[in-house]
Amino acid sequence: MVAIAFYAADEVGKLADLIGEFLGEPAESGPFATKIKQLLEQDSPTKVDKICSLVAGQASVLAENLETKDFEKTFNLVIAIIVQANIKLLDSTLVPEVVKALSSGADKKQLRLKVLSNLYNSVLPHGKSRPLVFKTIVSFAAENDELEAIIPTLDNLDLMMASWGFSVQQKSELYLHVADSLKKDLEHELLGFQYTLRHLAIIEATDNAALKVASQTAVQAVKDAIRYPSVFNFEDVFRLPAVQATKSANPKLFDLLKVFLDQTLKQYRAFVKANPTFLKDQGIITGTNDDVLVSKIRLLSLATLAAKYLNGEMPYAAVAEALEIPEADVEIWFIDAIRAGLVDGKLNQIKKAVVVTRSTYRVFTKEEWATLGNRLEEWKTNLKEVLQVLANAKLMGASEAAAVIETSG
């Protein structure tokens, strides 16, 4: 009996009959079914490719007409058939046709996504089809509110691209595709922002063509970094060559980025006063309410202030002045800064001071390196003193033990 993969010819024939039925042809004797059955009887080296092409060409007919209970098992049969074709035909024609059919409908969303995953796992790991299927899965999930289903897969994206032999440019393009897809869902837009940064990080400072293409993405990344309430690391954004390349074309936006990079609430107020409509014009805020940005720059200003009092006591009054808040609100803001991961410490309500045990440096410059070096020297000195105390204690213990032995003797 002639077979394609592990499916017997009669299974392929039944599929042909089903497709013929959906095409409105006579049962079992229509042109499509007849053509498939004739090919099955032939002993030709090209018959498998021809059958695969005919089946894949009708994938959209199947997707539109199959009932829910038959959808996955029928497409699993389609997949098992087409993967027997030569790799060139599979990559160039068959997989794209099946992918298009599965991703074009809005019904049976979860089933379509599952079948796309089955297709991904069925094609060769190192062929050209897997990247296409993966990109389609991401797009389809984003367009149909099914992103939760594919989020865990993204953890393996770098390994997947390595197995596909992706070039730097291909990696950059896929990062951007993933980023744009994630941003379609408000719940995942922050993760999308992270993939945007990965896309931009690949672009070299010397690649002028790529920098030009990425300019709009870089500008939007800066705006997103500023407007997202939970983004506090601006140094990674600021140092990206693609972001640096936007400085001359968007000087005001770059100035605002600098404010959030290493400046304080005072400089933010000055910027807004000098550019009263800029935030709204750039789409960073809607209306005139910039409360989110004010809260964010306050927390960043608190981190900057806390760094000056590391391992010391930071007066409530100093915090209140820097953040332009009543002293009664200082504790709330410090707790918020702890939650944001910017600082650590203990509140001393009696002294009206905060004992700062850790503060995030917003930028790490030569000054910070010098400070770190000084602290390491202090720790080194303190450690020597502790070791000396231990050594002295050991000597005293030995002397006392010898004296006891001598007395006993």
Image: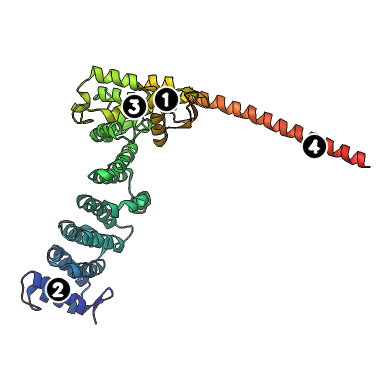
Q: Give the residue number, with chain letter if any, for mark 1.
A: 304
Q: Secondary structure at mark 4?
A: helix
Q: Tell me the residue at 37%/29% (across/down).
A: 299
Element type where label 3 sits in the image: helix
Three-letter residue code for mark 1: Thr
The residue carrying pointer 3 sits among few (fewer than 14), some (14 to 19) or many (20 or more) residues within 10 Å by Cα, namely many
* Nearer-the-camera pick, 182 or 77: 182
The CA span between labels 4 and 3 is 57 Å
Residue labelled with disc 4: 397
* Residue of label 2: 16
Left or right, residue 357 beside residue 164: right
Q: Secondary structure at mark 2?
A: helix
Contact (Cβ within 8 Å) of mark 2 with mark 3: no
Q: Which residue is mark 3?
A: 297
Indicate whether 210 appears above or below 352: below
Estimate the spatial distance between the alpha carbons at disc 2 and disc 3, rounded to whole Å: 65 Å
Query: In the rendered structure, which disc, 1 or 2, sits on the residue that comes first in sequence?
Result: 2
Q: Which mark is residue 203?
A: none
Q: Position of residue 293 (x, y in %)?
A: 29, 29
Which amino acid lies under the numbered mark 3 shown in the image of this protein?
Ile
- Residue 107 lies left or right of residue 409; in this view the side is left
